Amino acid sequence: MSPTKPVTLSDVALLAGVSQSAVSRTYTPGASVAPATRERVVQAAVQLGYRPNAIARTLTTRRSRMIGVVVSYLQNQFYPVVIEKLSQALQRHGYHVLLFVSDGHETGATVDDKLMDVMQYQVDGLVLASVTLSSAIAQGCRAAGVPVVLFNRTAPIEGVHCVASDNHAGGRLAAQTLIEAGCQRIAYIAGLEDASTQIERERGFIERLGQAGVEVSARAVGRYSYEGACEATRALCSKAARPDGIFVANDHMALAVMDTLRSELGLRVPQDVCVIGFDNVPQSAWPAYGLTTITQDAQAMVDVTVDLLLQAIASDLKSEAFATRRLITPVRLVRRTTVTG
Amino acid sequence: MSPTKPVTLSDVALLAGVSQSAVSRTYTPGASVAPATRERVVQAAVQLGYRPNAIARTLTTRRSRMIGVVVSYLQNQFYPVVIEKLSQALQRHGYHVLLFVSDGHETGATVDDKLMDVMQYQVDGLVLASVTLSSAIAQGCRAAGVPVVLFNRTAPIEGVHCVASDNHAGGRLAAQTLIEAGCQRIAYIAGLEDASTQIERERGFIERLGQAGVEVSARAVGRYSYEGACEATRALCSKAARPDGIFVANDHMALAVMDTLRSELGLRVPQDVCVIGFDNVPQSAWPAYGLTTITQDAQAMVDVTVDLLLQAIASDLKSEAFATRRLITPVRLVRRTTVTG
DNA sequence: CTGAAAGCGCTTACAG
DNA sequence: CTGAAAGCGCTTACAG
């Protein structure tokens, strides 16, 4: 099983008795090759077991057909779902994903450094789906000439595209749902303080609450992690007047909130406290939770992202200008069992 | 924001007033460059914002420092965990992962075809963590000269390495646990019939049961999916003598089994029926489930995989022979609340 | 439709 | 320690 040395284009040309150009054109869609020539090339190619070298092609065409995607916390099931859909959508267009998992514990500088590695692979585009990433990096990548889209996140950076759902409207919906359920002491569990998604959801929530003349009775920070959300729940419920309704910044944390409420604090959901989340991850639908939540349509977000990327790449190719896009996907309430009414 | 044309090595050489070789050596660890030369190169490089082109380097060195990883079903939380750990371990060694998500619904030929795309990117190694993949593909990739390791799976293919946990011992442990709990009618819910992992777990299970003089009272196939497991549970419980103990081929399905048992069938776990899974995914520890399970140490499996890959790549470099490895990671019981006793 | 030639951005013997 | 040159495997004007 000694690795045989790879068959190259010129090997094929030799065997087929044609020029390298002819072979190359045979594998370039739309190039002009006589049927007879193509036939001989193909025969030689299969005989030799020829596989074009995508790396060499990248060097000459300056197109790698690779998209860098950066994520951080895969425990939150929203991200695996996104990776799966994104990867499949990209594959359908002949692209592949170069994955980069940023470790949440590292400092910004380290992450940014390692991310620059990804740039060295000449990715044709970059999707940043990590909340913890500095905005500087997005700017840096864009400056390097690669289209970048922030996924499930926004930032007012010229040239950096964003795809997110309507977090503000979602926050409002959550508030309304809790109000209509008759909750009196409404609390909020935040994600990471400076995440745009977190900020928008909270803003919409507070705004709608305010319109009904109610204020958030308590607030804790769950940092987007399961453990953090458990702690936040304990903190909230140790107060004098425990909340009877909680909006949690995402489902992943909301599941932790429910676990803590029921198993640790002996409280019933929704009888003692209503819980509403955001994202609609697969587990939210599992009977053990039946979480009422605001749906974020991952498929729509992915489709929009791929479309955007493809357009941006095409524009780059023709050196056309391509305006910065900030795309917002609609959101809707999914009623299950964790909010009364 | 017009994409500036990238700075190349020769730009740096020009500005620094040295040869390309000098610049190249400055970025090649261990190459001999005079400190003064290096200094001038580095200065020119930062001034120009130079980033080495990993694609060009790959073409000359024949090492891409990319590892292809193939997965299929990311709903099963075991895989996101693996991807995260694998990606991070690889990054630590200067490698990156080219991800390929195979769609479970496609036919083998289609998948294999698309997988061959990944090969065109000259990956230095391949880890196949998809149950549904044909073994032919593993063989094909290996023949192309790339080290391949089957992850969480085994196959007796010369030259194809395997990393899996001790599924047979795990199956035995599950049987023993159910027997000791006093279960009388013990059932099994299988994954995908022809998956090696599925087969080994079941074999160990049946073997240990046999030693205690008991037989599997019922068996259903869950196909590794949540929905499949729900159906399997219904099928099992519609029989005359419903099982009082179930070993489920993995945790992802076991959670579905518990949901169906409790919410749909109104049965208590473990009072009415004991449930034991395999993998120890994060959700199994969540209070809503508290699933008793056989732990598969993902970190250990990943570490072993990376180690193996690195060794195989190094051997290839020196054109040394490298014996086929089949590595088995130990397994252990994690008692929580779904089995009595 | 076809081929010869240059070039993509690097690395690596080979001399010096 | 350093540089000139060849080469990695492809694509792409440019002639014909």
Image: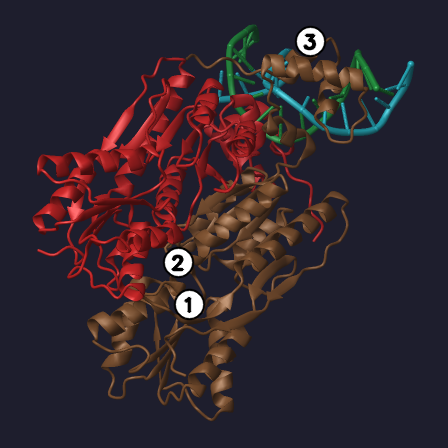
Chain colours: A brown, B red, C green, D cyan
Q: Which chain carries label 3?
A: A
Q: Which of marks 2 and 3 is nearer the N terminus?
A: 3
Amino acid on which disc 2 is placed? Asn
What's the CA distance linking mark 2 and mark 1?
A: 9 Å
Callouts 2 and 3 close, C-beta under 8 Å: no
Labelled pair 2, 1 in contact (Cβ < 8 Å): yes
What residue is pinned by disc 3?
A14
Q: Is residue A2 left or right of residue B44?
A: left
Pinpoint residue A195: horizontal percent, then vertical percent.
47, 66
The foreground one among B146 and B218 is: B218
- Residue B223 position, x and y percent, is 37, 44
Residue B283, given in percent of the width and then of the height, sits at 29, 56
Q: In the figure, residue B109 lies in which quadrant?
A: top right
Mark 2: give few (<14), some (14-19) or many (20+) Cα within 10 Å.
Answer: some
Q: Nearer the viewer, residue A75 or A183?
A: A183
Where does label 2 land, which residue? A76
Q: Which amino acid does the dot numbered 3 rest on? A: Leu
Q: Which mark is residue A250?
A: 1
Subunit that carries the residue with mark 1? A
Task: Name the residue rendered at 40%, 66% in the picture.
Answer: A251
At a point 8% along the width and 51% down the height, the residue shown is B182
